[in-house]
Amino acid sequence: MIARLSGTVSDVSEGRVVLDVSGVGYLVSVPRKFADSLDISQEVAIFTHLHLAEGVMDLYGFPDQKTKDFFLLLTSVTGIGSKLALAVVDAVPISALAAAIEEGKADVVVQVPGVGKKIAERIVLELKGKVAEYTGLASADQIGADADIMEALRSLGYKRDEVAAALKLVGDEVSGVEERLKAALRFLRKV
């Protein structure tokens, strides 16, 4: 099993990354917002899950262990495959999705492309009580870090709205002041 890869990003496309690890290029399907935060030649560690099905091997990658664990919880739901679980993780911030599941709000889950009412209800039914730990991913430390990032980027001339939008795109999966600042800058440079 391949649990984590560390290497150099050699190619990034929508939802996919080629990670060069000691001369071997691994094609990894990742959430789009994670792919958007990566640059060519960047050194990165990706937490991975190798999915084997009917002779096909697909490698799925995530920025951190929490996101990977949540993805695996989603794949444990009857009728949810790896591709749909990745779409869910990509479409809705994990903390918001976990809160909706804990509150029994299938209507939030239905907003994900490819998830119908029955699948959304199944996700809520099978995961309620199992995802409470994911509802508080935006900790007090992260909120304080975001305030520092806002101040730093505003001093560089970025507008409050631009920085807020970039931090929203960064989401809850990226933690630490430096990592969040770098990710926010990548989004701001693309605008």
Image: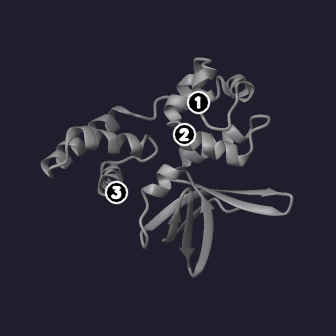
Label for residue 111?
1
Q: Which comes sooner in the sequence, label 1 or label 2?
A: 2
Residues 187 and 123: in front is 187
Q: What type is the residue that disc 2 sits on? A: Ala
The CA distance from mark 3 to mark 2 is 20 Å
Q: State the SS at label 2.
A: helix
**Quadrant in which the N terminus appears:** bottom right
Residue 186 place in picture, x, y as percent: 34, 57
Q: Which residue is mark 3?
A: 190
Q: Is residue 156 left or right of residue 139?
A: left
- Classify 60 as above or below 147: below
Q: Which residue is mark 2?
A: 91
Cβ–Cβ under 8 Å for marks 3 and 2: no
Label 3 Cα neighbours within 10 Å, binned few <14 / some 14-19 / many ≥20: few
- Classify 7 as above or below 103: below
Q: Which comes sooner in the sequence, label 1 or label 3?
A: 1
The CA distance from mark 1 to mark 2 is 8 Å
Q: Residue at x 68, y 38 (%)?
A: 114
- Classify 50 as above or below 98: below
Q: Residue at x 53, y 36 (%)?
A: 92
Residue 159 sits in which quadrant? top left
Q: What type is the residue that disc 1 sits on? A: Gln
Label 2 Cα neighbours within 10 Å, binned few <14 / some 14-19 / many ≥20: some
Residue 2 sits in which quadrant? bottom right
Q: Residue at x 75, y 25 (%)?
A: 118
Cβ–Cβ under 8 Å for marks 1 and 2: yes
